[in-house]
Image (spheres, grey):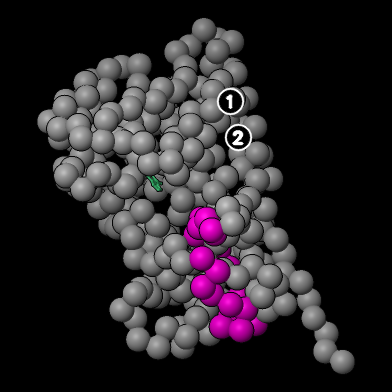
Amino acid sequence: MTLSSTALRLDGKICADALLETLKSTVTDLAQNGKRLPKLVVIQVGADPASSVYVKKKKQTAEAIGMKSEIISFADGVPQSALLSAIEALNEYEGVDGILVQLPLPKHLDESAVLEAISPSKDVDGFHPFNVGRLGAGLSPYALPCTPAGMMSLLDFYKIDVAGLHAVIVGRSNIVGKPMAQLLLKAHATVTICHSRTKNIDDYLKQADILVLAVGMPQAFKGEQLKKGAVVLDVGINRLPNGKLVGDADYASMLDVASAVTPVPGGVGPMTIATLLQNTLKLYYQH
Ligand code: GUN
């Protein structure tokens, strides 16, 4: 007979709701004291259906905790100059604390130029090179990228200390993989980043005490590839042809091998949004 154990489900909804409650109480105090309310502006270019869902969710959640929020929508073909002018106006406007440009952008737009146009002090995603550089240099940026910072908060919530552990990140994006490596290093993990050109990726997966999956490949990673007791953080949000949302991990197969796994949906996703609003409040106090 073999003994099997079931991994802990790292519930991002419960953790995010707890964070949102504390943010709501701070915002309620501001309102009761007649103070200006924090405001998040989300810019969307085009009408990608997945982006539209995320953007609406950000605004709804901001409003649910008493913050102000606005979505500014541009047509797919908007000239870059018009987008940059809008960002510059928002940079100057006192009533706006956080500016987020939803990614990905249409191909004709230069993503770096757009992100660099946002004032670092209003860069609620932490994507401006000023903030990226400060994070890399071990200094405090105005804001940390929401998905990685949200994952660190989730680990903290479940009292998982990564110091001395081997964290393997699959995916090297500016949004998740690279900043997550910085945050894990800061928390004293030993960090490896794997990506599409990594040879013998299974050798790295087998060594991972903490495994971060951020590649957007539905259910591509299986329990048999893990080290026993690994903690798996699944950033993937993939829609199957039947409409079901799944992560990059084959969740069911991981349960007997991992010690803890984030579900999809209900894992990393809710943490990203709660962290975005935490960042908005942080920028409000800093500006
Ligand atoms: N697209 C996917 N994730 C993100 C994110 O965290 N921020 C922005 N701006 N766009 C995204």
Above or below, 215 relative to 257: above
Q: Mark 2 near mark 1, Cβ–Cβ under 8 Å?
A: yes
Q: Which residues are magenta?
A: 218-241
Above or below, 201 relative to 127: below
In-image side of 119 versus 141 (left or right) = left
Above or below, 245 relative to 4: above
Residue sitting at the far front: 242
Q: Is residue 127 visible?
A: yes
Q: Nearer the viewer, residue 120 or 46?
A: 46
What secondary structure is marked by label 2? Answer: helix
Q: Amino acid at mark 2?
A: Leu
Predominant secondary structure, magenta span: loop
Q: Position of residue 65 (x, y in %)?
A: 58, 25
**Residue position for label 2:** 20
- Name the residue: 44% across, 62% down: 216
- Name the residue: 31% across, 79% down: 197
Task: Say which mark, if any, is on residue 65.
Answer: 1
* CA–CA distance in space, label 2 to label 1: 7 Å
In-image side of 227 versus 50 (left or right) = right
Q: Position of residue 269 (x, y in %)?
A: 54, 49
- Name the residue: 51% across, 73% down: 220
Above or below, 132 relative to 1: above
Q: Would you call the spot at circle 1 few (<14 residues within 10 Å), some (14-19), or many (20 or more)? A: some
In-image side of 78 versus 121 (left or right) = left
The magenta stretch spans residue 222: yes
Q: Amino acid at mark 1?
A: Ile
Which quadrant does the C terminus fall into?
top left
Would you identify the image quadrant in which residue 69 lies?
top left
